[in-house]
Image (cartoon, helix red, strand yellow):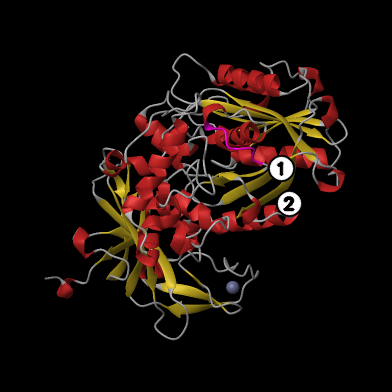
Amino acid sequence: MRDAYLIGAGQSDYGSFPGESYRSLFRTAFENACDSVPAGIESEDVDEAIVGTLGVGGRQLGLPGPAVTEHVGLHGIPVTRVENACAASGYSVRQGVQAIRSGMADVVLASGVEIMTDVSGDAVRYWLGVSGETEWERLSGTTFAGVYAQMASRHMQEYGTTREQLSHVAVKNHENGAKNPHAQLGFECSLEDAMGAPTVADPLNLYHCCPTTDGAACVLLASEDVVENYTDDPIRVAGVGAGSDRVGLFQRDTYTAVPASQYAADRAYEMAGYGPDDLDFAEVHDCFAIAELMAYSDLGLCEPEEAGEFVASGTTKRDGEMPVNTSGGLKSKGHPIGATGAGQVVEAFKQLSGQAGERQLDDPQIGLTHNVGGSGGAAVVHVFERGLGGDAA
Amino acid sequence: MSGPRYERSKRQDQHLIGFECQACGWVSFPEEKRTCKRCGDAPAEMEEVQLAERGEIQTFVVQQYLPDDIETPQPVAIVDLPQEGEGEPARAYGLLTETDLEEIDVGTEVVARFRELFSDGERPINSFKFSVPREEKA
Ligand SMILES: [Zn+2]
């Protein structure tokens, strides 16, 4: 099979930007991605573009793809919008890999964009809710924090996970985000501050929840046939896996895991020929603190009963054995729904190409990204490795 | 609200009737009887089963931060309702009412009632309400 490579990636700042539009944020992300390609790239090199977005606020709900690519000089090429809730642009990266592997494209832009902070409180709650299970969960007024809190309640009861362990996720991710110039909440927080935050959906407090965010992220992929035109230091997409599940939590067989993440991880590991022990870092979907703990076990980094201690012991800190969310994660870096998955790949690119600045890990070779839609109705996992890899290695 | 909600009969709305997949034992409740959500059997062979009114909280949340027009704190739970006979319990989702927050925990026994939650103007929108049985309250 034709291999796909990551040749560049960039993002806009994540935050609340009343002076920006989805077009200007997208343009910034696109320019940063193009600038990151070692040998440079021209707009006319791009064969196809995929844009992930939920469309918070409505805006350009139809044709949001061409509506942003027309502003970055991508004219006439096929452009598709991908919607899979918070996993939209993780799936746009996957679709980009598919386009390259199938032979239909040599260079693909896989991207995402979302504007969330310019709509009213009630409107943003509505748009945050649209990916929830509608018949029962939304009807009874359950928010996403409420659904993840149900996972947390059960995790605490079944495995003895504590609120303090959940708060360690926030402390760690803020420590990383403070070193990421693009982060929305780029400040450190103490364990005391994290634990003393007001309750949102018991047992989850404000520091167990990610913010709402404006932002865009762009990833440039190239086929093995053209990769050498763009870089001498290629990063191979070693594995891609995705999965789905029942949209409502209460209809699943477990409340303490996200089966869609397990399906996605198993498939990505199998394709890559690597397992959790081979990873040098992971960017995981920490929309809520409990989501990061479940990701640890769903991705095979530890057992579910060890997840709380896994973070509290410092194992997943930047200087720990298994760094997780060096970017700051959704918690500190921010969560512009449609841009999040591609944004995770931006961090993987920066770490693997040695451009992560103050948060750079020591010469990582293999990294993973994990992106979840809703409370686990969809998930997608990518494994990246430095070098040509595969048969060419 | 969309589709399946309107497909239920009045009898289903007023009685706790579930449908058991004869292939894998999953109990669909209260809506789906053509496809099994667990094993994917379709068309599934479903047998009607009567569910008990009392079940056990599997997990729960007490929501604090909600739109202004919703009363808080608002507890919501996933409850397993056992069958009257042998077989797996059915899964129900809904609000906890008339219950002290301290009484709510994984494993707490509650009574399930299917009640009108609100009206969409044309017909009542029904959902579950759970409560700790009164006689067991202090
Ligand atoms: Zn079945």
Tag 2: residue type? Ala
Q: Residue flagged by tag 1: what amino acid is it? A: Glu
A102 falls in the magenta region = no
SS label for mark 2: helix
What residue is shown at x 37% (from left), y 59% (from top)?
A: A161
Q: Quadrant of ligand 1?
A: bottom right
Q: Position of residue A316 (x, y in %)?
A: 49, 47
Q: Is label 2 in contact with label 1 (beta carbons under 8 Å)?
A: yes
Q: Which residues are magenta?
A: A359-364
Q: Chain of mark 1?
A: A
Residue A107 position within the rendered picture, expressed as x and y whole percent measured from the top left: 79, 29
Left or right position of A329 against A393: left
Any mark on residue A272, and which? 2
Q: Residue at x 55, y 52 (%)?
A: A377
Residue indicated by mark 1: A385
Q: Nearer the viewer, residue A196 or B137?
A: A196
